[in-house]
Amino acid sequence: GEIGREQAIKTGMLGTVVRERGDLGEAERLAHAAIEMHRPLRGENHPDEMPMRVLLALIHKDRGEYDAAEEILRVVVEIRTKFGGPEHTQTAQALVHLGAVLVAKGDFEAARPFLETAVRIYREKLGNECIYTVWAESILAGAFARQDQEGDAAHLFRRALAVRRSPVGMAPEVAESLHDLGTFLAQRGRCQEAGRLLTDALALRRQLYGTEHPLVADTLVSLARLRRAEGRVDVATG
């Protein structure tokens, strides 16, 4: 009973760590294993299973399998809403994950109401400076950026970086904000500031993940595009 539940939770947590290291195949195996351990104990669609479902959706998202990720996350939102209510922070978390997939998919109009609702819930329940509020705002900023709402996007990207650089922040999130704001500014011709931000993001991501991680590659791509726009070829390879 309880031992089996704890083992399922630990397996899911290990899957999360493995995904962050970039091993999506092993992370997927662990996510499925955690779900199979859990279902005989609590049944299908129990709230305790939702973190494992989210992990599986994030793996699909990492692979660019957005339809599969969206399908899983819509179920997660439905179950979180049913058990916790529409204003619960766990519902907000599911809405952010779903909104992020829709942004990645290019469906910005569909993403915005989910993200705006999540931001409102987090602000009301946890406050403006909470890391979860900033996380939701940073995803919403990405939607704004792709809909040419540059002022709103820039404000949220800069706010996210400022909060994440404070003592409550963590290095992976700081790197993410450096990358997001740098990429946003580079796309709008703000090359000098963008270059500083992306260089810092690259150094931090290399320190956190090593040289072969997909997130390092993402920042290298953004920096390479910036250097090409500047007419430079000394892309960050050092």
Image: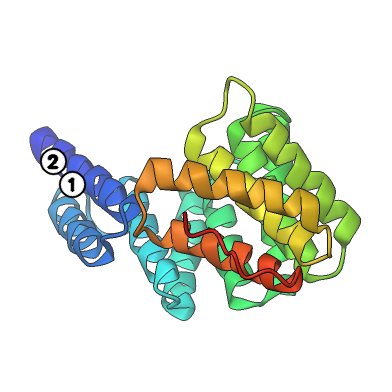
Along the line of sight, the residue nearer the viewer: 102 or 86? 102
> Quick check: marks 2 and 1 in contact, CB under 8 Å?
yes
- Relative to residue 12, is residue 141 drawn left or right? right
Residue 149 visible in the picture? yes
Q: Residue at x 36, y 55 (%)?
A: 211
CA–CA distance in space, label 2 to label 1: 6 Å
Q: Residue at x 13, y 40 (%)?
A: 7
Q: Is residue 98 visible?
A: no
SS for dot 2: helix
Picture quarter with the N terminus: top left
Mark 2 vs mark 1: give the one in front: 1
Q: Residue at x 64, y 24 (%)?
A: 166
| Residue at the extreme right of the image, as rendered | 151
- Residues 46 and 143: in front is 143
State the mark number for residue 7: 2
* Amino acid under disc 2: Gln
Q: Residue at x 83, y 58 (%)?
A: 190
**Label 1, on which residue?**
11
Q: Residues within 10 Å of mark 2 (few under 14, many from 20)?
A: some
Secondary structure under tag 1 reads helix
**Residue 138: horizontal and vertical position, in percent?**
67, 49
Q: Residue 228: horizontal and vertical position, in percent?
A: 68, 73
Residue 227 or 124: which is nearer the viewer? 227
Instruction: Give whichever of 93, 161 is nearer the camera.
Output: 161
Identified by mark 1, the residue type is: Thr
The image position of residue 114, as x and y in percent, is: 67, 59
